[in-house]
C-alpha cells in the first residue's frame, strides 16, 4: 500500500499503517495563528479524501497541546487580517466536525480557550494529568468576547447554563474535572496519552467506514448544525466589528501590556 506523504509548516504528520497522527508544531506553546489554522484545514480535508487513511489522532507535544489563540500576534493584524483569521478558524472547526473518519484528540498538556474548542470538535478526547494542564474558556480574564460559534460549541458539550456559569467564572478544568464534566473521555498520565488515543482509534477504525461515517453524522446533528450550517463570513465580520470597539480595544491592550510587564 502506497501512503501519501503530507507536509505542513506548523504541523508534524506521521502516517502509521492505516491512520495519521497530526501533531501541532507551532512554536513553544503551539499558539493558534492563521498559518496553523490553514495547515490544519488543508491536512484534514486531504486526510478525509485519502482512502489509505482510516482515521486520525490530533495531538500536541508533551505538556503542551496548545496555549490557545496567539493574542499578541492577533493584536498586530488589521481588519482584513482579523477577518481572515476568524474565517480560517471557523473553517478549520468545520473540517474537524465534518471529518467522516474516527478522530481522537490526544490532549498532551494545557489546552485553554481556543485550543479547548479545537479538541471539542473531535470524537474522543484523552487528556494528560498535570497541575497546569487545563481546558476551558477563560476569555473574561482577558476582557475578550468569545465568538458566537465558539460559545455554541462549548454550550453543546457542557449545556447552556453550566457553560455560561463556567465562562463567567473563567473556569479552567484539570483533566479529572474535565472528565467529570464530559469535556474529555479519559484522564491519564501524560506519558500514556498518545498510546491511549491510538489504542482507542485502532478500535474505531475496525468499524466499517460507511457505518461509522453515517452514524457519526446522525449522532452529531446538533454539533453539525452549530458549526457547519453557519454563515462564517458574517460571524467573522461581526466578531471583528465587535472587537473594534475603542473601549474594548483599550482593555485588551491593557491586558497585553500586563503580560509584557510580567515577562
Image (cartoon, grey):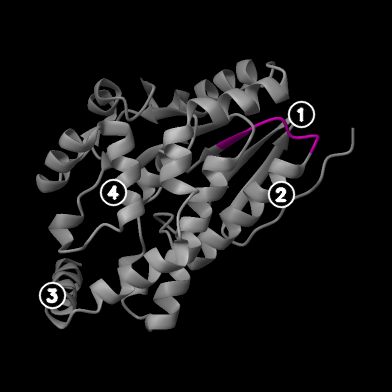
- Identify the residue shown where x is 42% and y is 65%: 86
Q: In the picture provided, is 83 more to the left or to the right than 71?
A: right
Q: Quadrant of the C terminus?
A: bottom left
Residue 64 lies in quadrant: top left
Q: Which residue is mark 1?
A: 17
Label 3: few (<14), some (14–19) or many (≥20) C-alpha neighbours in 10 Å: few
Give whichever of 244, 253 is nearer the camera.
244
The residue pinned by badge 2 equals 46
Which residue does the image show at 35% across and 43% down from the upper left? 153
Tag 2 secondary structure: helix
Mark closer to the chain start, 4 or 3: 4
- Left or right: residue 135 versus residue 202 is left
Residue at 27% across, 39% down: 155
The answer, for residue 112, to whether it is visible in the render is: no
Distance from the alpha carbon under mark 4 to that under mark 3 = 24 Å
Q: Which of the two residues, 18 or 183, is positioned nearer the viewer here? A: 183
Please name the residue that numbered disc 4 is placed on.
Answer: 151
Where residue 176 sits, quadrant-wise, is: top left
Q: Please report whichever mark, 2 or 1, sits nearer to the chain's N-terminal start.
A: 1
Amino acid at each position: 500500500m502506497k501512503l501519501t506523504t503530507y507536509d505542513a509548516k506548523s504541523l508534524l504528520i506521521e502516517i502509521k499503517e492505516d491512520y495519521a497522527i497530526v501533531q501541532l508544531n507551532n512554536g513553544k506553546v503551539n499558539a493558534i495563528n492563521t498559518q496553523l489554522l490553514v495547515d490544519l484545514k488543508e491536512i484534514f480535508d486531504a486526510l478525509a479524501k485519502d482512502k489509505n487513511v482510516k482515521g486520525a489522532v490530533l495531538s500536541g507535544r508533551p505538556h503542551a497541546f496548545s496555549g490557545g489563540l496567539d493574542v499578541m500576534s492577533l493584536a498586530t493584524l488589521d481588519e482584513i487580517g482579523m477577518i481572515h483569521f476568524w474565517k480560517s478558524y471557523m473553517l478549520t472547526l468545520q473540517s474537524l466536525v465534518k471529518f467522516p473518519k474516527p478522530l481522537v484528540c490526544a490532549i498532551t498538556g494545557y489546552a485553554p480557550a481556543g485550543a479547548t474548542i479545537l479538541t471539542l470538535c473531535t470524537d474522543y478526547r484523552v487528556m494528560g494529568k498535570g497541575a497546569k494542564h487545563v481546558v476551558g474558556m477563560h476569555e473574561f480574564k482577558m476582557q475578550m468576547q468569545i465568538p458566537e460559534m465558539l460559545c455554541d460549541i462549548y454550550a453543546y458539550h457542557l449545556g447552556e447554563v453550566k457553560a455560561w456559569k463556567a465562562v463567567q467564572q473563567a473556569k479552567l478544568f484539570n483533566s479529572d474535572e474535565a472528565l467529570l464534566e464530559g469535556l474529555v473521555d479519559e484522564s491519564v498520565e501524560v506519558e500514556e496519552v498518545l498510546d491511549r488515543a491510538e489504542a482507542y482509534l485502532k478500535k474505531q477504525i475496525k468499524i466499517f467506514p460507511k457505518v461509522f461515517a453515517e452514524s457519526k453524522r446522525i449522532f452529531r446533528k446538533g454539533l453539525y448544525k452549530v458549526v457547519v450550517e453557519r454563515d462564517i463570513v458574517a460571524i467573522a465580520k461581526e466578531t471583528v466589528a465587535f472587537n473594534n470597539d475603542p473601549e474594548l480595544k483599550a482593555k485588551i491592550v491593557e491586558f497585553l501590556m500586563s503580560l509584557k510587564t510580567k515577562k
